[in-house]
Image (tube, rainbow, N blue to C red):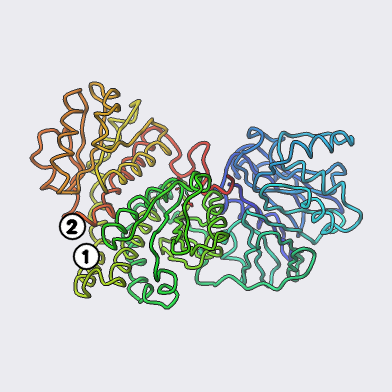
Amino acid sequence: MCGIIGYTGRSESLPVLIDGLKALEYRGYDSAGVAAAADGGLVVVKKKGRVAELEKAVAPRGFFSRCGIGHTRWATHGEPSDENSHPHCGGSGRITVVHNGIIENYLALKRELADGGVKFRSETDTEVIAHLVQKYYEGDIHKAVTAALGRLRGSYAVAALCADFSDTVIAASYHSPLIVGLSSDGTYLASDTSALCDRADVLYRMSDGETAILRPTGAEFYLDGKPVVKKAIERSWQYGGAGLGGAESFMLKEINEIPRALKKTADYYDGGFFDSERAAKTFAGVRKIFITGCGTAYHAGMTGRALIERIARIPAETDLASEFRYRKPLLRRDSLCLFISQSGETADTLAVARLSAGAGVRTACITNVPGSALAALCDFTIPTLAGAEIAVASTKAYNCQLLALYRLAFHLAYMRKRLSKSFYKENLSVLSRIPSAASAITENAYRDILPLAEKYKNGRDIYFLGRGLDYYTALEGSLKVKEISYIHCEAFAAGELKHGALALIERGTPVIALLTQGELKEKTLNSLAEAKARGAEIIGVGKTEYIADAGVFDGRLTLPDTPDLFAPLVSVIPAQLLAYYTARARGCDADKPRNLAKSVTVE
Ligand code: AGP
């Protein structure tokens, strides 16, 4: 949920820190700060607001440093403010730390330290770490950090500086990601690879419980006080920080990248990815699949469950990751847990992956960051090649997650001889045409959507309806609209409307209805007629033959003629665009919506 950057080397640290924070700002943007070793001490500058505010505050300070750390915050404990911003210092002011995670026992530690005379300046859990390191510091900063971490319960990615070691950064990670990068120019630290790809030549992911000592000439890693040798992250799975490239926003850029992302991902799978021995071993004899994720990834999982049961005839369940771990699922040795996560760093999803691995269940993940913590935890990784996704609202990654799930469902069906080779190949060729269907929407739909966005921008509610596969798409469309335009939005299973939600429908209430499943069309139209009779204004989203003649619609967003089974890969795009243009019409920041962050690395 926060972004950490660190550097020690031959160059000036401040530009490296600020650039790194800009690349990581999508992880949290309530406040930002830097600390640098300079003139025998530490310079700490921190500000509420975006990195740009910090940059203005740092400029006049005029210090020079070759070693520093930085942090961009998504507030967990303590409101966004200058005082609650990171870095936080120990009592002497010669030790400072930044932190990503949640310290669950921070109040008890805070009381213990306060009883010992420590004066706290912030409401954060992180400041407790700074004072603990100060407490244990007796001349060896690595030892002091290690001792302090031994007192903590919870999750942490920590970077620490001590003025007595002006070229050294100490790092530590537990259930919160940290990447160390090496180059001839120095040694780097960051919360994810996007901030380091253009600077570091070799990247290492820190494992749970590890600490690291970063110096200009390299890094040493330790686990339980003993040196460890690390394997570098595969270069091919590292994304550079994506630039806007002239687009008006990352979200619109990423929606327009959907066709290319789908094509690149499909081409990768077409190269025999699912035919590998590793894939065979992972899925052989699986009798039930448990699919979990959060938010958008969860919605992809709902479609995935339907596809796996319908096409491969394997029982499957979908759960919110934050719920799954507490419902004591009936995991068996012939079960497989499939995790879906764009970032591969979502704490709720990682927690379930650890639980499943611990239960001896086979694990696989679908992620857009194969060098992520989730990929490191799972037996098998199905990568999506959507490219770096910077906007908080996930779009192209979602479409690619669905593609991965279609391919997995057909692969499992073919492996179990539930379909002939010709039928398998025929469906793969349909999938290969999806990117052009997506282009037909991204290139033209905005003409119909812009007026709708203008019309609904001051609305109080917008509802999405769908049945079967369309219901899962409706859920995703609803999340998109609410999370970036802040308009209240809900999705209902069309058949459920009459069981309560219909009470919400008033004259003029906007209802976006997904109609891509011919076999369910009549039933869905009946549900829409019920809403229409109560005054709803209904916009139909589907292919011409399903929405053209139905009198229930006040507007239509026509989809290209895609086989019903594959419609979810593209039927979400109008909703993604509606969300974007409605947010823009309301003057909302679609890339960095309030209260949210791209990667939710705290539970
Ligand atoms: C999606 O638009 C949201 N930003 C959010 O629900 C997101 O999907 C969720 O936090 C899961 O993220 P992940 O895919 O990186 O695990």
Q: Would you say 388 lies left or right of 505 here?
A: right
Mark 2, residue position: 563
Q: Amino acid at mark 2?
A: Pro
Extreme residue in the right direction: 138
- Residue 338's place in the image compared with 394, above or below, is below
* Residue labelled 2 has its Cβ within 8 Å of some atom of ligand 1: no
* Percent x, y of residue 78: 66, 33
How many numbered circles does the render carry? 2
- Say what secondary structure mark 2 lies in: loop
- Quadrant where the C terminus is found in the figure: top right
Quick check: 283 left or right of 169? left
The amino acid type of the residue labelled 1 equals: Val
Q: Nearer the viewer, residue 1 or 285?
A: 285
In-front residue for pair 190/132 = 132
Q: Where is residue 262, by image quadrant?
A: bottom left
| Residue 141 image position (x, y, % from top left) | 84, 57
Q: Earlier in the sequence, mark 2 or mark 1?
A: 1
Residue at the spot of label 1: 430
Q: In this image, 399 relative to 82: left or right?
A: left
Give the Cα separation between the discs numbered 2 and 1: 8 Å
Foreground of the two, 266 or 316: 316
Q: Position of residue 114 (x, y in %)?
A: 84, 34
Q: Residue sitting at 54 percent across and 48 percent down?
A: 348
Within 8 Å of ligand 1, the CB of disc 1? Answer: no
In the drawing, what numbered circle is on residue 56? none
Find the residue positioned furthest to the left: 549
Observer-nearest of 528 and 80: 528
Regarding mark 1 in the picture, which secondary structure is present there?
A: helix
